[in-house]
Amino acid sequence: MNDFTRRTALKGAGATLGAAAFAHAMAPLTEWTKDLSLDEFLQRHYKELTPEEMKVILRRLEEETKQEYGRDVTIQDLPPQEGVSFGYALNLSVCIGCRKCAEACHQENNHDRRTGNSYIRVLEMEQGSLDLERGNADYDHAVPAPGKYYLPVQCQQCDNAPCVKVCPVQATWKEQDGVVVVDYNWCIGCRYCEAACPYHARRFNWSKPEVPAEEINPDQGYLSNRIRPQGVVEKCTFCLHRTRAGRLPACLEACPTGARVFGNLLDPKSPIRWVLENKRVFVLKEELGTRPRFFYFFDK
Amino acid sequence: MDTALEDGVAATSSIPLLSVLVALTLCGCDRDVPRRLQPAPGASTGVETVLVPEKLTSIESGEVDARGQPLRVPCVSCHSLKEPARMPDGPEALQEFHRGLQFRHGELACTSCHQADAPQSLHLATGEPLPMTDVMTLCSQCHGPQARDFRAGAHGGMTGHWDLSRGDRTRNNCVSCHDPHTPKYAGALPVMPPRPKHPSPTPEDRSHE
Amino acid sequence: MAASRHVLDYPRFLGRLLWMSTDGSWRFYVWMTVLTAICLVGANAWARQLVDGMALTGMSDHVSWGLYVANFTFGVGLAAGAVMMVIPAYLYHDHEMHDVTLVGELLAVAAIALSLLFIVVDMGHPERAWHLIPGVGRFNWPVSMLTWDVVVLNGYLLLNLHVCGYLLYMRFLGQKPRKRWYLPFVFLSIFWAVSIHSVTAFLYSGLGGRPFWNSALLAPRFIASAFITGPAFVILLLQVIRKFTGLPIGEGPGRTLTSVMRVTVLLNLFMLGSEVFTAFYTGGAHAGPAQYLFFGLHGHHALVPWIWTAVACNVASAVLLHLPASRRHVTVLNVACVLAFVGVWIEKGMGLIIPGFVPSTLHEMVEYVPTVTEWKITAGIWAFGLMLLTVAVKVALPVLSGQLASHSAPKGEPTSQEKEHRAAA
């Protein structure tokens, strides 16, 4: 019996020690929970929010940006336009591979400055080959180099998007204007979409994005360029905070050679429709059946 | 007794599970707030403007003004006063002004585009005079496909609004990008040089390790 | 009346088992302390990863899954394979097997728990896991294969918990288990075991953008390799149990499992060979990942030592298992089991997940090397899984052997202690 009580006491001591050690091991979590508000934790899916709830959330996010990044920003939630379905085309004959589009994307979309993130990757390709295996994204010499052409790749806004299919929580979906978006406050960060995307279009926030206050683009959208939280996936949205206000995407405006054509696929008089009807366009990895809305063409 | 026991086990395992499932299904009915759309674009109100680059009406003097801006001299300040010289055969003949002009534009001669007696103005292939600011008409004579693409919005780039019902749009001029004397687009060093592709943590983060 | 009795008695029974599990020999305490320490190191690393972000891992936008998902995949296979023992026991009425099926099911429970933990640590926002609850969150079922995986893994966990719990409870009460309360579940769990690993394979093989995974052979390969690791682990586990508890476990189960492994190791190698042939004979872009995995590509070789270790382990275990010595000498068998386990762990983990990402979908070469954080968390989860298994086996066996029963005095606990002491001595 003596042995029994001694054993119980020892067990108690062991359990206390274990609990203390566990608490100590998990101590960093206090820092983590500090950043996590209850409102954010309980926030429901984008599609379930009423306009009033969305308003409250947008103000909360603006407040948080002010506190964490020291910048007054405006976060809007612009809806898609009736009768508008976006399409993009890129003229490979005139693209010189200067990466100005990638830079504009970096600035417009408040990408992490440390990693130099951008939704656009430009591949230097061999003339006469469409084999991505022979492409190189790490070129660092004067462009255009002889014998090369340049293939900028960004989200293709597929109509049959593998990323949307695989998301276990519907945190990513296709909007009525054709743009595939992510609800950064709903994404669980499993990165299945990143594995599913055949175009390397998705990015994960491996750490909290760093952007100096003066470099922050204050014109922000809930579904697009607001500063993303750590641990969620993000992607190109055709700059929907701009394009849903009728403006052109940042990458298009930045292109010094006018290689990019953007517009409303439903408008027969739009430049994008003209390209689709008059140029021999193609899409990347057509054989995968993803049905991209991003088209490429050569002039000559 | 046995039957009762079995029922008991069944009850313990299935009833709570079932009620949870029912509850979940009930609140799982379609909760999506219907997505409102913006009204369709109305009648066109925006304007499309084609840039008229300064270089069509003036030239850099090589001097800078008080604010450090390059000082430009209007073409007419020389070309209206000076007795028009004979149009040179090629750029190397330019001794006094426009020295060092590079010319790589096919088999063209200066007078193919410039008026022989008024070099600040252009002329079409028919000989019809053309103000310098209408240079795009001149280019279009030879570069039909580009002109066609430009008109369609598929060449030359633009800024502003894709949707003219919501704002204006600015188009580049041919000569915004192409120097008419050396029209091949100049290359450049790319921006955003390659970086390590692993998002390595900051030094502070590493200190935790 | 009887029902209400069980409502209280069953949790009480589970509580008693849990309390009992804290008793043991000094070896048991040392073992559990070591595992706890590793767990705590892992927990600490995970807490830091949550705070500082997944940048602490070796993953990147190019290789967006790594060691965690590799171990998840392996864990699911282990869980599926553990139920291998159920098939001969119930389908072929192998009576000797009946007694040890429970061990397999407990292993399945521990392996599923381990797999689920590997998913949790791989998530950028684990606190948002409630978004996965059907009805409360937005469960993208049936479109997303990941939701299928959530369903089948949790279902498998419940299924095995039910079967184990019911059989043990009945044994404890001294009653004969009613077939209708466990047999349908046992048969279901056999199909379910195949489904969990098929679904896990479909997670990868359904992705058209990843040629290395986009193979119909992936699911069969997963099943074959599961039926290597499951039996291999159980063969070793049964010996440990025999050694430390003195429970009389016959040679039969081990022999049955060994014959299963003799088939599956060969099947697995055959399918690996088929994949290798298809990749290399066809060539082109589809061979890129295989080229990278086996020989290195464009000057990148990080996985080459891994995969050749795996191939060596798998071939060696296949040879050993087919040597007559494996029947006579248990050491030979044990070495074969360990080799098979390690070989499949690499082949199905690092050797399968990472080449899916290298070269990337835009054919960029970015390599992946796990960081210290990842190794700590991985070790922590494995330690946790082993703790779970130890406790589960430890409490189940006295009930199974009849040492702990409702009709015996509550002093049954010291009795089992004494037994432990004797075993340890």
Image: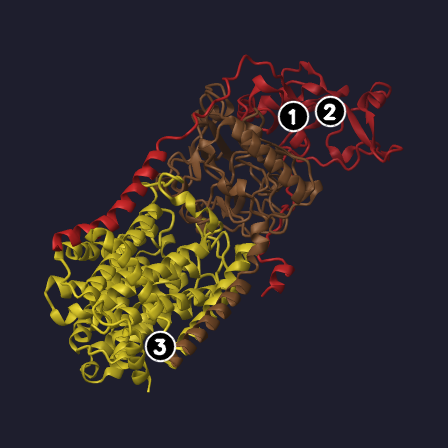
Chain colours: A brown, B red, C yellow
Residues at marks 1 and 2 touching, judged by CB atoms closer than 8 Å: yes
Depth check: give the residue in front, C415 or B200. Answer: C415
Residue sitting at 67 percent across and 13 percent down?
B128
Instruction: Point out the frontmost of discs 1 and 2.
Output: 1
Distance of label 2 from label 3 (alpha carbons): 94 Å
**Does residue A91 appear anywhere in the picture?**
yes
Depth check: give the residue in front, B95 or A171. Answer: A171
Which chain contains the residue that carries disc 2?
A: B
The residue indicated by pointer 2 is B56
Depth check: give the residue in front, C326 or A296. Answer: C326
x%, y% of residue C155? Answer: 28, 51
Q: Identity of the amino acid at label 2? A: Leu
x%, y% of residue C63? Answer: 46, 55
Which chain contains the residue that carries disc 3?
A: C
Compared across the picture, whether C100 is left or right of A203 comes to left
Instruction: Point out the frontmost of discs 1 and 3.
Output: 3
Q: Secondary structure at mark 1?
A: loop
Which chain contains the residue that carries disc 1?
A: B
Q: Among all residues in the image, which is located at the extreme bottom?
A: C425
Distance of label 1 from label 3 (alpha carbons): 86 Å
Q: Among all residues in the image, which is located at the extreme right?
A: B66
Compared across the picture, whether C84 is left or right of C357 comes to left
Residue sitting at 37 percent across and 71 percent down?
C22
Q: Identity of the amino acid at label 1? A: Asn
Q: Is residue C343 above or below residue B93?
A: below
